[in-house]
Image (cartoon, grey):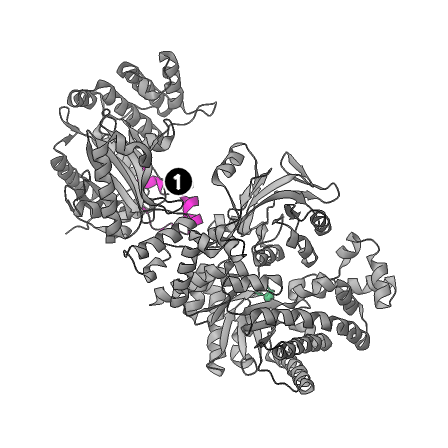
Amino acid sequence: MAEQHVYSFGAGAADGDRTMKNTLGGKGANLAEMSKTGLPVPAGFTITTDVCVHYSKNKGEYPAGVKEQVDAAIRKVEKAMGAEFGSTTNPLLLSCRSGARESMPGMMDTVLNIGLNEKTVDALIKQSGDERFAWDSYRRFVQMYGDVVLGVDRDEQNEDPFETIIDEAREKAGVEYDHELSADQLKEIVAEFKKVVKEQKGRDFPDDPMEQLWGAIGAVFDSWDNDRAVVYRRQYGIPHEWGTATNVQAMVFGNLGNDCATGVGMTRDGADGTPGFNGDYLINAQGEDVVAGIRTPKRIEETFEKDMPAAFKELTEIGERLEAHYKDIQDIEFTVQKGKVWMLQTRNAKRTGFAAVRIAHDLVEEGVIDSKEALNPRRIPADDLNQLLQPIFNTADKKSAQDAGKLLTSGINAGPGAASGKVVLTAETAEAWYNKDNNVNLVLVRKETSPEDLRGMRVAKGILTAQGGASSHAALVSRQMGKACIVGAQELNINYAAKTVSVGGTTLKEGDDISIDGFTGEVFAGLIPTSPSEVMQVLDGELKAEESETYQRYSKIMGWADEHRTLNVRANAESDDAAEAVAFGAEGIGLCRTEHMFFGHLDEIREMILAETAETRQKAVDQLLPFQKEDFTKLFTTLAGKPVTIRLLDPPLHEFLSDRHLEEEPGLDEKLAKIAGVTKEDVHRRVSELHELNPMLGHRGCRLGVVYPEVTRMQATAIFEAAVATKQAGHDVYPEVMIPLVGFKTEFENQAAVVREAAAAVFEKAGVEIPYTVGTMIEIPRAALRADEIAEGAEFFSFGTNDLTQTTLGISRDDYGSFMPQYREMDIVPADPFQTIDQPGVGRLMKIGIEGGRKTRPDLKIGICGEHGGDPKSVMFCHDAGLNYVSCSPRRIPIARLAAAQAAIAAG
Ligand code: PEP
Ligand code: MG
């Protein structure tokens, strides 16, 4: 028997069902399912996604057998609906709609009223007794078909010629709306439309119903590859190979009089999750009118019951049945024709993060699903929890800004949240303005940020840079601080001297208002108001948990996630953010970047850098010890017995002192010369010695400690003295000392020896022993490849996937913004590899590292502390690869907790 390409549905029966989404697309599968459950679905058939794939590959050729199967399916529809396609006495009209496996709302094409021509329109007039309705249907058909199938172009003024004709007709008739046009006027419009087709396309508008139908089917398949659909798929990770199905269905009419209506609704509110049937509808209209915005639709929850009590009751019951059947909120399309309800679509509704949490929670309370099912990533995509934590723009305010042309540009959405405030271009100015007024809202705008911008970043609400990528300094620091951040907005032209930021023709001065949406990467001129989330208000102690239902639901979901996950979740944090991390549920610190703690003590670290001999360096280093000890003691105390991984100094020294610093701060050379007891020339010479052409591959990581062991010794001593002090103050403490950028076992051994010696000395002096471990980051390929050897000494591993991605791909984490957007657009890479682990490459190395490490030490504790540790897809990978924990910035902890649970549940 020939392969089945066409599946019929309707009239209480169907060839397919809801399990067949891959073949029938979501819409087709659900139309079949609704038919099977006895819901009123106009009869029709689905042409499979395989046909689309074949059609795309073979330049519009259909597989053998499709035409015959379509013919047979039309006969079934005719029988079910009691009408005949193309009949001039009792015509059946058809619709043709796309429907992929995953819904791609509005991205592909639809054609309605197929089968109308000069003869069938007469029959429709007789049948319906409504001349105006028949001509309006024909007008709609010619317009849609002309647009979608025949590709009628806009005119020289970039106007849609069909719309121009309607506008003129309305004007001539002196009416405001389309539905006020008379049958005769509509008839004239149809003739005008056909003229446009003839002029533009050099052919007559097709009259033959079968030709019309095949034109529409082809257009729907073609629309799988239109720009909008391609861009949408890229954004949501939908494979291009899937193809769409085409659904052909008998038309039902919501525009046959005042006992007719059409609408789209949801069984709960998709924005906030409130239960109850809601949505938009129009009396005496066709589906497209509701979404087209020509007439303002009415709200179902407000007036539908009054307008059509019987239909309202039936639809409410259908909604409840569908929810019970699909165990999820449904998004439905319906038409009421002469009082009879017809279902045109149902699907699991799209929802915001807020609604996702509420609906999943409520469905568990209602006994519809269990807590495990509530955590399904289809119900709560882990990333969407962001929305419950970050300040947000009110949708209407953002839309008005967009409509007012305030959108300036966009960049990489590196730190979620919305921020608006005054443009400030330097950290010093930011601090100065903040010190004058603690309530001032600032957005720090820089070409890029470096560690000395931290103070400015801390007081700013948001950070915007022209350069850099998702793991650039600006990105990871702002995420860690929980600030909205956009990086790599390359169109920004920042002039520090003139204190301006410009894009195209718009220039903002320092102090002017700017707004950034870190969820989307959009940058706006002017102020869009933001509001803090309720969950954050509770976590910050500004709102009581009992007063926030949103918080209570969030907290329940988090509790369920914790029951199911096996991965531990830690934080990348070192100072004030550590307490926030604990509030978010961190089970330890996975990465304390000690260099971030140095920034309050720049003079001392610069003195250390300028030291020429071991003795003078020792002297400078000794000054840093008490600061480090104090910071570590605070951190250990905050973590109250939870493990704390402290990484030794990692960045190249010129991040603390370079020509740029000397240029930007007049007199700095003189000041430093005095502090370090050297000449100004010495300062400049040393700075030029530190300059590196390729700093990310230069003198950094453990290479610093190998050459300057006194720095490692000082840091280790500070760690253990702090641990002893914490213990003596009555708190448990578990330090884990981590050596960065190890490639050779010998590097690790060299540094571990210094750390262990320092520990022994501190413990002996204090008369206290504290258990600790020394481990390493695995962040360059050689470390992964030689993991078995390295694990002989290293007691834990933590994958530094920022550097591991950089070194494996040979792509600079700070410079990839100049080509990555294009790489994404051209599908050269499936995702930004600095956000989501490149599993075949970097992931492969991780697996080699895990296998090697555990060969030597079967119980080796392994984690990840690169930015990927808070990315749901990467967390899934980490779970499957057998990691013990993921570590991420504090605000991503809830996301990682949920993603870890989802990974554990998926793995069974
Ligand atoms: C890493 O490389 O993944 C890492 C966590 O270290 P850093 O980002 O500080 O280089
Ligand atoms: Mg690193």
Percent x, y of residue 240? 38, 49
Give the quadrant of residue 138: top left
| Image quadrant containing the C terminus | bottom left
Check disc 1 and report the residue beneath it.
226
Q: Is residue 450 above or below residue 76?
A: below
Percent x, y of residue 782? 56, 73
Observer able to see residue 250: no
Percent x, y of residue 264? 31, 37
Residue 241 is a magenta residue: yes
Percent x, y of residue 60? 31, 41
Residue drawn at 37 percent across, 45 percent down: 270
Span of residues in magenta: 219-244
Observer able to see residue 670: yes
Residue drawn at 21 percent across, 43 percent down: 66
Residue situated in front as seen by the camera: 73 or 34: 34
Residue 481 is a magenta residue: no
Residue situated in front as seen by the camera: 308 or 845: 308
Left/right of residue 501 with respect to residue 879 in the rendered view: right
Three-letter residue code for mark 1 = Asn
Q: Ligand 1 is located in which of the four quadrants?
A: bottom right
The residue tagged with tag 1: helix, strand or loop?
loop
Give the quadrant of residue 283: top left
